[in-house]
Image (cartoon, rainbow, N blue to C red):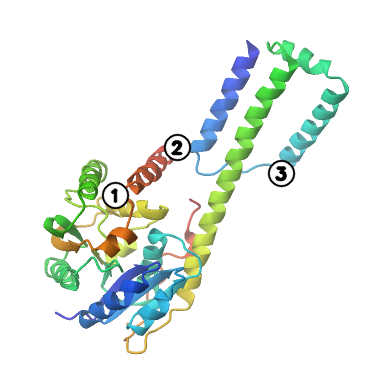
Amino acid sequence: MIIKILLISAALGVAVLVLREKAPRQQEALRRAAGLLVVLAGIIAVLWPDLTTVAANAVGVGRGTDLVLYLLVMVFAYAALTTAQKIHRLQYDITVLTRELALLQPARSEGGEVLPRSEAEPAVRSAAKQEQP
Amino acid sequence: MSMQDVCVIVPVYNEAPTVAKTVSDLRQTFDHVVCIDDGSRDGSAELANAAGATVLRHVLNQGQGAALRTGFDYVLRQTTAAYAVTFDADGQHLVEDAQRMVDRARAEAIDVVLASRFTGRTEQMPFAREMILRAAVRFTRMTSRLEVTDTHNGLRVLSRRAVQRIDLRMPRMAYASELLDAIVPAGLSYVEEPVTVIYTDYSRAKGQKNSNAFNILFDLAVRRLRAVQ
């Protein structure tokens, strides 16, 4: 059945995304085109509901609603995953900012001596150098 | 021996009941104590500052790993310290232990001195905690190729070289394993020193929950998986 191949490869694609550090750089144009395509397909499916069954039969699924459900699951998994990764990256960026901010303004203590600053030494690690998580 | 070139890093998150005493005890021996206030909302930062610590403030809570990393960056960028000591704010470590560990690092020219509560003396450790820690030790010995008898102990001494080479990027508490895992690949020498860890009602309530062991394993497993790609 064609649908099995399609669904399993989609599931594997999601699995690859889980294991990758970052989602592949997404082509903005491609995403927009895909979005418009979904809208178009939605309108067509509303106007001619039987067409979903035709499409379903073509890939070896009995009912059109089942095909729509399968697609929904895959799209949802993809969306949930990329959103989670985006939040992860944001969290990491916030950590970098918070740490840099802390380093900018150390509150010296009254009695505390201050170690001589290491001017000669270049900053070994700076935020600019840090890769994404 | 002089402790002029030692910077003690104390991560602090809502430790108002103990932080002042911890800092002033440390200041008896160490000239430079830096508290990384990880977004405390109980005035810990002011208490630490008044007790004699330099305070770096995370405006948002970012976890202990991030706090230590800020401390390490401070040591590298803004000081010439030869040694960094990490020390918990909840009063479970003894300053003498830290001092002895620094002396040993210096005398034997060792990069990393780790504290062990299992070769040392541990006061009133709950049984379940001991079981989990012993399992964690076995796990660490397998994964980091270190001959250690303790893990996730907040007391450590690192040479400047070690601070430069160890890069922490794990979230939450998994950084402790990450730090240990980095020692062998970075070509650093290490040794364990027996220490005393005091479990008080406060540290038990404030410290890590046993169930957090699962979270640490999860974070580590995700890192392994991602390292494969």
- The residue shown at (54%, 61%) is A94
Along the line of sight, the residue nearer the viewer: B188 or B87: B87
Which circle marks residue A28 in the picture? 3
Who comes first in sequence, dot 2 or dot 1? Answer: 1
> In terms of image quadrants, where is residue A34?
top right
Q: Which residue is mark 1?
A: B181
Which circle marks residue B229 in the picture? 2
Which circle marks residue B113 in the picture? none
Q: How far apart are labels 3 and 1 at the CA level?
A: 39 Å
Q: How far apart are labels 2 and 1 at the CA level?
A: 19 Å
Discs 3, 1: same chain: no
Q: Are marks 2 and 1 in contact (CB under 8 Å)?
A: no
Camera sees residue B74: no
- The residue shown at (21%, 62%) is B111
Q: How many marks?
A: 3
Discs 2, 1: same chain: yes
- The residue shown at (49%, 69%) is A100
Q: Chain of mark 1?
A: B
> Which quarter of the rendering shows the N terminus of chain B?
bottom left
Where residue B19 sits in the image (x, y, percent)? Answer: 32, 74
- The residue shown at (26%, 82%) is B31
Tell me: A124 left or right of A68: left
| Label 1 environment density (alpha carbons within 10 Å; few <14, some 14–19, many ≥20) | some
Identity, as a three-letter code, of the amino acid under mark 2: Gln
Label 2 sits on a secondary structure element that is loop
User: Mark 3 or mark 1: which is in front?
Assistant: 1
Q: How far apart are labels 3 and 2 at the CA level?
A: 25 Å
- State whether residue B174 is above or below residue A33: below
Where residue B204 sits in the image (x, y, percent)? Answer: 28, 59
> In terms of image quadrants, where is residue B153?
bottom left
Q: Chain of mark 2?
A: B
